[in-house]
Structure formats: structure tokens, C-alpha cells
Amino acid sequence: MSLFDEGDGKELKMSSGSKGKVKWKPGDSHAVGFATTTVRASAEQAMAFIWDTEARAKARHDDLEKAVDERPSEHNMLVYNWKKTPSIVDNRDFLGRTLWRKTGSGFEIVSTPESSERRGTPRKTVRGKVTSTMRIVRVQENVTKLEFVIQPDFGGELPAWFMNRSLGGQLARVTETRDYFQALRHEYDAEDGVAIGNLLLSETREEKHHEKGETRVESRVRALFVKNNGLKELGEKHRSLQALIAKVAANKLRPAGDSKAKLCNMTEKEANVIGGALASCIMANLTAPAAVDEWILRYPAMGELEREYVRERSERKKELAVAACQQLTPCNTPRTARAKRAEGAGERTNKRHQ
């Protein structure tokens, strides 16, 4: 962790909401990676999920075997992981000792390579080594910060540059933890909105294998509506909402159509029109909030959606409207050109009568 305390290092491209860096120790060709993100869960919940190495939610497509060989205590376990690699190189397996301890601000988990006579290396497989540290820091009651440092060595004759390029996938563990707890939430607030927005704009491995007649964005949105409890409940109540969000996420500029449909009877065709209109609203306005306001005012279904679910935003708009009315007193109310002409005509009439 101390290697990144100064904040320097080469930035890595990570999923929105996470930050990653890479750095090299003097005289070491294997890079050290660092990633951090914020999780909407307590430190204890995050710790329990990370420690449960055999959880189904952590299963990956390239796992050939994952097992806990030893568990001497609740703070100590020996973990084995066998990974499938592309056919041009041998598979890799890893055996490491993982320990955790409680700290004043949360928890720390440390993993180091280890050898064992009970666990030999399978045929056509090379033993790799991974050293890592996870720091789980309590921010609030249900907000936790994750800081993860890892230095992998895949062994064999793989060049260092190839191993260094794989750091992004190794560091994605913090993002997977964040997304897991985000998917469990039912009621959304402003921070959840940002998190869901980041997920909508983050490409996934699964979307490359989308169904026939479906775009990658539509596949990504469909998967989010399946995994996330809050979106699933919204989709069950408003069937065409998934199509609307897919058009928003696609963000393709097209002429904005008209739709007077209400939320209760909005069809998929009308949802496509409404969702596709946001891009043109963004193009026509100087700020994103102004674009969203225009979008909501133009389509009755979006106004209903705002009043039903975005309570904070609706209340804030009411407060601003009341404040504006209070400021527009007779002495400082701006006069229109028509009012000025009427006032001038009245003055001329009074002079003639005098």
C-alpha cells in the first residue's frame, strides 16, 4: 500500500466509479497494480463477501477449479485456483495463504504464495504466484471504501509486458464487489443513480455474445434489469422502461419525435421515441440538467416517472419555483416591451386630458 501513498503511478482504464494505477518497483519487471472504489455496504458485509472465496457470485468463466485446501482458523485459509488460458499457452494455477485481521478503521486481507505437498501442479499447467493486500475502510454505516494492491507473476516464459497488461482484470475484483452490493439494493437515491448510470455506460464481456437482432447496448441493459433488484422491480411495473433506458444508453443523435403517452400505457415504440430524444436535448442545451429538464417537460411519461420516483428532485424544483415567485415583487418584476408601451400610452393620454 505504501508504494501508492504518494498518489503517483500510471493511470489504468477501469470501470466508471473505480480508479486504478500501475507502478514498478526498482529492479522488478513485474508491475504492481492498485485499485480503489466505494461500496454501498457496511465494512462487515464487504469483508464477509470478499472472504467467501467459493461464493457462486465470484465464479468466473476461466475457472477450472477453485477450492479451500486448509482452514486452520477463521482468520486463515489456503486457497487453490486453477485457471484456463488461451490454447497457445499452458494453463495456470495458484496456491496462496490468505489471512485477515480487524483494524481500527475496518479490515485487512493479505495473500501470499505458498507451496504444499498435497497440491501438485496438473498436467500442462504452470504454477504462478500472486501477492495481494485488500484494505476495507469503513466510511459510514453502509458505505465502505476498498483499496486493493496486487502483484501477479504468472510464471513460465510469458513476457512481463503480457502479464502487466492483465493487471486490469486482476484489479476488477473491487469493481465486482461494488456491483454485487449495488445489485442487491431495492430503493435508489442520487448515488445509486450515478452507480446505475456508470453500469449502463460500462462495456461487459457478456454483451459480446448478444442475442440475434439485439445490439450490445440492449444486451447490457437487459442483463442489468435481470441482476439488479431495483431495476427488476421497475421493469415488472413498467414493461417498456427497459426499451427506454436502452435508447438512453445508446446515446445516438436523431430527430426527437413526439409522444403524449402516459407512463401506464406507454408502448415499446413510444419508449424508443422518448429514450432516443435525450441525445438531441443534450445537444441543444448548454448543461446536462437543462437538457434533462427539457426532456422531462416534453414527455408526460417522464414527468410522471419523476414525480413518482425522483422525489428529491421534484421537491427541489418546487422550492426553486417558490423562491423565484417570492423574489418577483412588483418593484423588481421585469417589464415586457408590451407593458412599457402600454405605460407610455397611458402617460400621453393623461397629458392630453390635462
Image: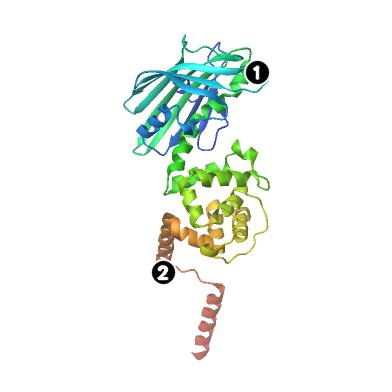
Task: Please tell me how crowded label 2 is: few (under 14), some (14-19), or many (20+) other residues with Cα within 10 Å.
Answer: few
In this rendering, the answer to whether 213 lies above or below 51 is below
SS at badge 1: loop
Task: Please tell me how crowded label 1 is: few (under 14), some (14-19), or many (20+) other residues with Cα within 10 Å.
Answer: some
Residue 38 appears anywhere in the view = yes
Q: CA distance from mark 1 to mark 2?
A: 77 Å
Residue extending farthest bottom: 353
Residue 122: x, y in percent? 56, 14
Q: Which residue is mark 1?
A: 89
Q: Nearer the viewer, residue 8 or 314?
A: 314
Mark earlier in primary sequence (1, 2): 1
Q: Residue at x 57, y 27 (%)?
A: 62
Residue 9 appears anywhere in the view = no
Q: Nearer the viewer, residue 259 or 218?
A: 218
Q: Nearer the viewer, residue 157 or 191?
A: 157
Q: Which residue is mark 2?
A: 329
The quadrant where residue 332 appears: bottom left
Q: Residue at x 50, y 21 (%)?
A: 150
